[in-house]
Image (tube, rainbow, N blue to C red):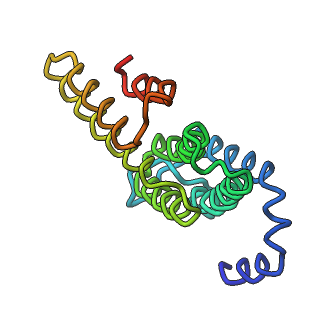
Amino acid sequence: IGYVGAIVISLFDYKSIAKLWPLIAVFCIGLMALTSVFGITVAGTDDKAWIRIGGISFQPSELVKIGFIVTLAKHLDVLREREKLKSFWQIMLLFCHAAIPMGIIHLQGDDGAVLVFLFIFLAMCFGAGVQLRYFAAFCVLADFTDLRLISQKHGKSGQIADVCSSQIVVKICGFTTKDFADDYIIAYFSGFA
């Protein structure tokens, strides 16, 4: 079935498929929502990320991966055409683009698929020319968010982690005083402001 599907898809012009990105996005979000409500657990797994149709079980996240690639490619192409791949806000929207399907799939319990989505996202963004400083800032924020949660669990306020993550992210991203608004936004997202 997979080979037949690949042959059929290869007959379409990829530009015409990219024009359908809004429909593809709605279909993928609907499919993930359907799985969240009516998903089942298949023997040998502990996630609720499968749907049974007519006696056949399949994992909708596999179809969503294809839709994710199409919509992310279109998103990156639009940013590249408008020369917005260096814009902080546009990069945050890219992260949101990835976070929505990854968050829903995580809630279904399929963290293996989340890692695949993350790899696809990172590879496509790197290939499109997104600056690595944004990925470094994201990693630092994620790391210090874990530190903050750990410090709160042990009765600390988490403020040390907030201050450190804000300062490190500002330095990694290379912002200057003229970028004060961006500095404040990063500090806000890390919980410092």
x 69%, y 61%: residue: 70
The quadrant the N terminus occupies is bottom right
Q: Position of residue 24 (x, y in %)?
A: 75, 53
The foreground one among 173 and 71 is: 173
The quadrant the C terminus occupies is top left
Q: Position of residue 21 (x, y in %)?
A: 77, 54
The foreground one among 55 and 74 is: 74
x 81%, y 64%: residue: 17
Residue 42, visible in the rendered structure: no
Residue 123, visible in the rendered structure: yes
* Residue 62: quadrant of the picture: bottom right
x 43%, y 33%: residue: 176
x 43%, y 55%: residue: 132
Relative horizontal placement of residue 70, taking residue 59 as reference (left or right): right
Q: Position of residue 101 (x, y in %)?
A: 57, 46
Q: Residue furthest left?
A: 154
* Residue 147: quadrant of the picture: top left
* Residue 96: quadrant of the picture: top right
The foreground one among 120 and 193 is: 193
The foreground one among 38 and 96 is: 96
**What is the tally of numbered marks visible in this picture?**
0
Q: Position of residue 152 (x, y in %)?
A: 21, 21
